Amino acid sequence: MKYAIEYEHLKDELVMNEETRWQFNQVKDSANKYRLELTDEDFKRFLKLQASDEDVKWLMHKMSAYKLSFTDALITYITY
């Protein structure tokens, strides 16, 4: 069974054009790949990072593999 959370309740608020749609889908797909159930706030944070071309997949991998919070994964990313 494929793990999939659609985050539809955030789509209307966060998707404004094709670029933000692509960014939204990148964050959503990465979260599902790493089986992360993101809070609304963490999803929005990841969306900002995606828009800044940061390594969202690396952060999500760390969160998933090491059971880190968003903040702890971000600190690991900054100090890496």
Image (spheres, helix red, strand yellow):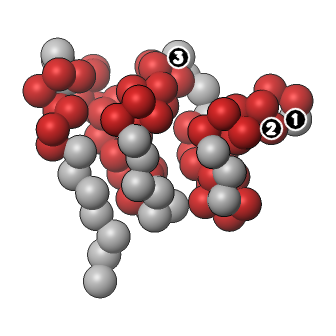
The residue most toward the left is 12
- Residue 73 lies, in percent from the top left, at 70, 41
> In the image, is residue 29 above or below residue 26?
below
What secondary structure is marked by label 3?
Answer: loop
Q: Residue at 80% of width from left, 27% of height from top? A: 78
Front-most of residues 32 and 43:
43
Q: Are marks 3 and 1 in contact (CB under 8 Å)?
A: no
> In the image, is residue 62 above or below residue 56?
below
- Residue 76's tag is 2
Side of 13 relative to 65 (left or right): left
Q: Are marks 2 and 1 in contact (CB under 8 Å)?
A: yes
Q: Residue at 80% of width from left, 38% of height from top? A: 76
How far, Cα to Cα, is label 2 from label 1?
6 Å
Q: Residue at 40% of width from left, 41% of height from top? A: 39
Identify the amino acid type marked 2: Thr
Q: Are marks 3 and 2 in contact (CB under 8 Å)?
A: no
What secondary structure is marked by label 1?
Answer: loop
Quarter of the view holding residue 65: bottom right
- Residue 38 lies, in percent from the top left, at 42, 46
Quadrant of image for the C terminus: top right
Identify the amino acid type marked 1: Tyr
Q: Which residue carries the number 1 mark?
A: 80
Disc 2 or disc 1, which is closer to the eye? 2
Which one is earlier in the sequence, the residue at label 3 or at label 1?
3
Report crowding for label 2: few under 14, some 14 to 19, many 20 or more residues within 10 A (C-alpha): few
Q: Which residue carries the number 3 mark?
A: 52
Quarter of the view holding residue 55: top right
The residue most toward the right is 79
Report crowding for label 3: few under 14, some 14 to 19, many 20 or more residues within 10 A (C-alpha): few
